[in-house]
Image (cartoon, rainbow, N blue to C red):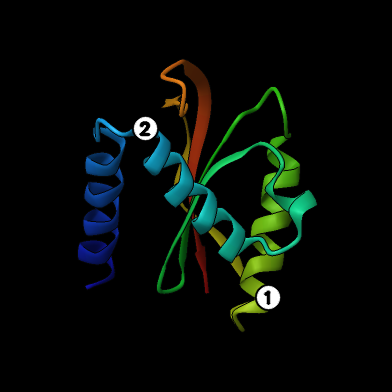
Amino acid sequence: MKTKLILLAAAIASVAACSKDLGKVHERRAALVARVFPAEADRTGISLAFPVESHLEIIYFPDEVSHAAIQSRAAAYCKRIGHPTLKVARPLKDTQTTLADGTVRASKGILYDCD
């Protein structure tokens, strides 16, 4: 069931990324990031934070934030939702993110499981 929900979330994110109105996509992504990371400082360098049940997908810009910082923020999120053990559900991978102005930036994506 979790796998199906994760695949559904990924499909929704992919469809949203293909939307012609990149500004709205950016706004939705920013709202998700703000919901997962309420402290503004924790949002630095994050393009997407997508929670599904006890999973958290994060896409970030490695030139703005380190992997160690992302892992620390994810661990804090897991703790906040009452599942303090952080595991990697899908390893780190190189991705590309399209920004609101249409430019494409190198990014990295990872899927965590709060167990």
- Which residue is tagged 1? 79
- Which residue is tagged 2? 22
81 or 14: nearer the viewer:
14
x and y, in percent, of residue 111 in the image = 46, 51
Q: Is residue 72 left or right of residue 6?
A: right
x and y, in percent, of residue 78 in the image = 62, 71
Amino acid of disc 2: Leu
Dot 2: few (<14), some (14–19), or many (≥20) neighbours within 10 Å? some
Image quadrant in which you'd find residue 63: top right
Q: Residue at x 41, y 19 (%)?
A: 102
Q: Residue at x 52, y 74 (%)?
A: 115
x and y, in percent, of residue 67 in the image = 68, 38
Q: Is residue 22 left or right of residue 42?
A: left
Q: Secondary structure at mark 2?
A: helix
The relative height of residue 9 versus residue 95 in the rendered view (above or below) is below
The image shows a total of numbered marks equal to: 2
Q: Residue at x 72, y 28 (%)?
A: 64
Q: Residue at x 65, y 27 (%)?
A: 62
The relative height of residue 49 versus residue 22 in the rendered view (above or below) is below
Amino acid of disc 1: Lys
Name the N-terminal-most of marks 1 and 2.
2
3 or 97: nearer the viewer:
97
The relative height of residue 10 versus residue 93 in the rendered view (above or below) is below
Q: Disc 1 vs disc 2: which is toward the camera?
A: 2
Q: Secondary structure at mark 1?
A: helix
